[in-house]
Image (tube, grey):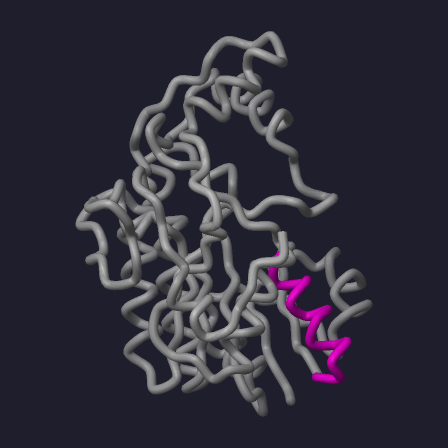
Amino acid sequence: MRYTIIGCGHVGLELARRWARAGHAVTGTTTTPRRVPELLKVCAEAVVLRGADQDAVARAAEGADAVVLTVSPRLGRAFDAASRVAEYADTLVASARAAVSAHPRVVFTSSGSVYGSGSGPRIDERVPTTGDPDASPRSFVAAEQVVLGSPGGAVLRIPDVYGHPGDLDYPARVRFAHERLGGSVPFAAEALLYRIDYRDAAAALDFVVTEGLTGVYNGYPDAVTPPANAEFFGAICAAEGLPELTYRGEIRMPEVPVSSARLRGLGFRFER
């Protein structure tokens, strides 16, 4: 099989490794030219492009059996509500349009922010998406709609990704928030801090693609309900001798448990 992964960050590159080990040919993309050698250690082809570039995406997707969209807005433009507007629209919505115009089989990696804070005792895929005007949920919802409007469209909603050796661990994230953001973060104190290991996220995407799934799936490790942001990060602040974070509540995430029963019912298992 031949696959194209638009956005080879930690999850996308791990997915490429899985497919390369299985004997598939993978075209991986990045916006950063210096990462091409890293991608070529795993991918049969590495392409420098923006996900919103329809012509470039069409060329990268030519001959592929499926296109996986694992693009992420730049961290530096995600902490301010005004900055998020253009960044999220370009990275998510425009990239989804380019992918769908290039191929009928697109799998999009989305976010639990589409649920907002949630309602009811538990969130599953039948819960309506939020009407929150913030650029994060609004753009994720819009990108999902684009992908789901295509014949082979599928959406995997995942929580915060962690575990990659090159990523910031949580104490480092807290220090970054204090040093660079004045201790103020755009999330809500009451949101549950669901997390997924980058390898499980890649495995879930692999499962959706290889099983030929379409529609929406939650990829939330749901064996245990996690602590809320305030509890989790409060403990880190105490351990690090730092003041408590300030939660602005601009980006709402689920405050009630999220179920991945639909995905698990089809045979997927979280390993970590």
Nearer-the-camera pick, 208 or 89: 208
127 horizontally vs 1: left or right: left
8 horizontally vs 77: left or right: right
Residue 90 occupies which quadrant of the picture? bottom left
Marks counted in the figure total 0
Q: Position of residue 84 (x, y in %)?
A: 37, 42
The vertical placement of 250 against 16, above or below, is above
The vertical placement of 197 against 104, above or below, is above
What range of the chain is rendered magenta?
11-24
153 horizontally vs 21: left or right: left
Chief SS of the magenta region: helix
Residue drawn at x 36%, y 50% as measured from the top left: 258
Residue drawn at x 57%, y 63% as measured from the top left: 7
- Residue 199 drawn in magenta: no
Residue 44 occupies which quadrant of the picture? bottom right
Residue drawn at x 64%, y 86% as measured from the top left: 2
